Image: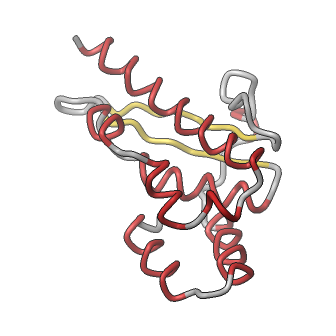
Amino acid sequence: MTTIDDIRDNFELLDEWDDRYRYVIELGRTLEPMPEAEHSAANKVNGCVSQVWLQKLVDRDGGAPILKYRGDSDAHIVRGLVAIVLSLYSGRTPQEILATDAIAVFNEFGFRDHLSPQRSNGLRSMVERIKTDAKEALAEAS
């Protein structure tokens, strides 16, 4: 998976939004395939215009739980946005997830000005879903 720092560096190299959109779509193509059975109502993210699924996998090996995700969407650009969200959050502890401000990163990338309000709401819905998972993991651990 591409790191958020790599994504940030690549965004800085791309001046035109058409190029940035193509890059986001390309990021979506790098997502680990999500099994068809996981395209379920339980994994569906509500609040997104496109279909979005996030599958949570919890690794409890040795201490704090690590939340890992697989994600998918039926829209190419949204699949790329899922890849960016996962680069921020997948493979992190609940504490790290709760301390990460994804909206600030999206604003840094210019998404506020270049995504439709519906797509922006979808991004927020994905982030809220992952933060809720992190809060639940913390509650279960205590």
Q: Residue 18's x, y, as percent?
A: 74, 81
**Residue 81 drawn above or below residue 48:** below
**Residue 134 drawn above or below residue 48:** above
The mark total stands at 0
The image's colour scheme reads secondary structure
Decide if residue 85 is on the left or right side of residue 33: left
| Frontmost residue, 117 versus 49 | 117
Q: Residue 81's x, y, as percent?
A: 63, 56
Q: Residue 37's x, y, as percent?
A: 74, 33
Snapshot quadrant of residue 66: top left
Could you tell me which residue is drawn at 31 percent across and 12 percent down?
Answer: 139
Decide if residue 96 is on the left or right side of residue 71: left
Residue farthest along the front direction in this orientation: 113
Q: Residue 137's x, y, as percent?
A: 36, 21
**Residue 74 drawn above or below residue 20:** above
Could you tell me which residue is drawn at 67 percent across and 86 percent down?
Answer: 16
Decide if residue 79 is on the left or right side of residue 65: right
Could you tell me which residue is drawn at 40 percent across and 31 percent down?
Answer: 58
Decide if residue 114 is on the left or right side of residue 2: right
Snapshot quadrant of residue 4: bottom left
| Frontmost residue, 101 versus 80 | 101
Q: Quadrant of the C terminus?
A: top left
Could you tell me which residue is drawn at 46 percent across and 68 percent down?
Answer: 2
